[in-house]
Amino acid sequence: MADTVKLVWDDKTYELPVIVGSEGEKAIDISRLRQDTGFITMDPGFANTGSCKSAITFMDGEKGILRYRGYPIEQLAEHSSFREVAYLLINGELPTRKQITRFSVLLNDHSLIHEDMRHFFGNFPRQSHPMGILSSMVNALKSFYPYLADTEEEIDIIVTRLISKVRTLAAMSYKISRGHTVIYPRPDLSYCENFLNMMFDSPVRPYEIDPDVVHALSVFLILHGDHEQNCSTSAVRLVGSGRVNLYAAISAGIAALWGPLHGGANQAVIEMLGRIDRKEMTINEAVERAKDKNDPFRLMGFGHRVYKTYDPRTKIIKQVCDRLLTKLNINDSLLDIAQTLEDIAVNDEYFISHNLYPNIDFYSGIVLRAIGIPTSMFTVMFAIGRLPGWIAQWKESMEDPEWKLNRPRQIFTGPQIRDYVPIEKRTVKV
Ligand code: ACO
């Protein structure tokens, strides 16, 4: 393969270097394009723009492949735990016994929240969305834990502190929003067990930890661990590129994840299925509305910027969903609606020709409902899962010698230079 691409303009030829990744992905290096030719590139939505080189996650949207640090998502979901996957994403290798023990000790040591932070929760209006609260609280961590690290060991502590405290903050915000007693983390419980216990234990009704629920939660979090340069991860990298602290960069990622076209889709799917269940629309109406160009309605949980085939995570979460509902003996009408909707959509010409398949969010909400997580907390659950990925990407960008302040360009389409008009001489253009 040639190692340059030729760009011909006005009888001049420019040679642009080709970059090839370890899985054969190709890119044209345009970093000198403006300097050498005066051109910038235009790519709204960045669908064809590589913003960095990364060794963390590989995905192939045409073949439906997802790997973290080379390990297929299917193997990680089957054999690993969320704690181990978090370690893998951040450090690049699966941990040894000694390494995972140290990681677990750090997670336990840093699981408590500064007591003064609890007062914040009480001051958010009752109906505040938990994603807004989480984003604010993570940003506030910098004020409570101002010391940021330089050495590798200190970075380990900050990273584990964040992973551990986000879980505590999420459970605490739920308990406080319901006016319930806050439950503190316990050192004898694993990461997922602790989260479930903090969410659902109560002084009058002890929570019984079910290993199948723990497994379902662990797989849910693993599947959300990282997804290369998606909207929220790009937000973390972009905000982080100004050399802001880790907490502020992650807070930006949480805000980006909140949107219904991104992480908020899991909540939007359940709301859509709920509308069908309450007979506010039929399944066929939902499908027809999604196909209508004059209707902004979309089938939530369908389609993906990169996957143009079945999302590999959807197969896994669907299996987890079936197993969990059977084990807990739950008959969720939303699952029946989801399955019928999927059957109709994947056989419909519009969805086939647009390469629209169910994404992970289509079934993940049903798993979360079965666990007992309220719908308003769904995107928070996604954020807990995505946190190791955000941290890994932030760390990689900080260590990258080629890394620069992120600052895209634009093509200006506004008015050309004109003279200031005093207010008494201004007229309204109709
Ligand atoms: N329902 C109906 N039509 C859709 C859908 C959908 N869910 N998704 C895309 N389309 C159609 C668009 O109308 C468009 O049609 P056209 O070419 O005839 O005009 C075409 O497919 C391409 O759509 P784009 O929005 O340009 O595709 P993009 O890659 O930008 O969108 C996205 C990806 C945002 C995920 C989109 O599929 C969507 O809105 N899905 C619903 C929300 C959702 O489930 N989001 C979760 C994504 S996964 C995640 O972030 C965890």
Image (cartoon, grey):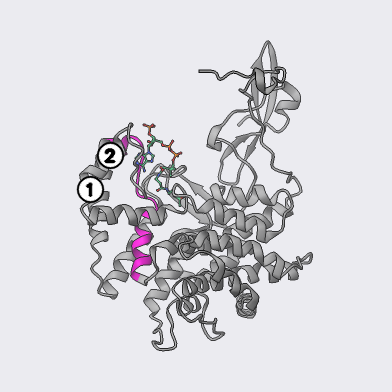
Q: Is residue 76 visible?
A: no
Q: Quadrant of residue 11?
A: top right
- On screen, 132 above or below 10? below
CB atoms at circles 2 and 1 under 8 Å apart?
A: yes
The magenta stretch is: 350-370
Q: Is residue 408 left or right of residue 133?
A: right
Question: Is residue 410 or residue 422 the one in the foreground?
Answer: 422
Q: Which residue is mark 2?
A: 289
Q: Which residue is mark 1?
A: 281
Residue in view at x 23 percent, y 62 percent: 333
In space, the residues marked 2 and 1 are separated at their CA atoms by: 10 Å
The image position of residue 407, as x and y in percent, is: 69, 39
- On screen, 13 above or below 315? above
Q: Is residue 152 left or right of residue 127?
A: right
What SS does tag 1 mark? loop
The image position of residue 63, as x and y in percent, is: 42, 45
Question: Is residue 176 or residue 158 the one in the foreground?
Answer: 176
Amino acid type at circle 1 is: Met
Mark nearer the N terminus (2 vs 1): 1
The image position of residue 154, as x and y in percent, is: 75, 70
Q: Is residue 286 left or right of residue 264?
A: left
What SS does tag 2 mark? helix
- Locate the N terminus by quadrant: top right
Q: Is mark 1 within 8 Å of ligand 1?
A: no
Residue in view at x 74 percent, y 44 percent: 404
Q: Is mark 2 within 8 Å of ligand 1?
A: no
Quadrant observed for ligand 1 in the rendered image: top left
Residue in view at x 69 percent, y 68 percent: 158
User: Which residue extends farthest front?
Assistant: 424
Q: Main secondary structure of the magenta part?
A: helix
Amino acid type at circle 2 is: Arg
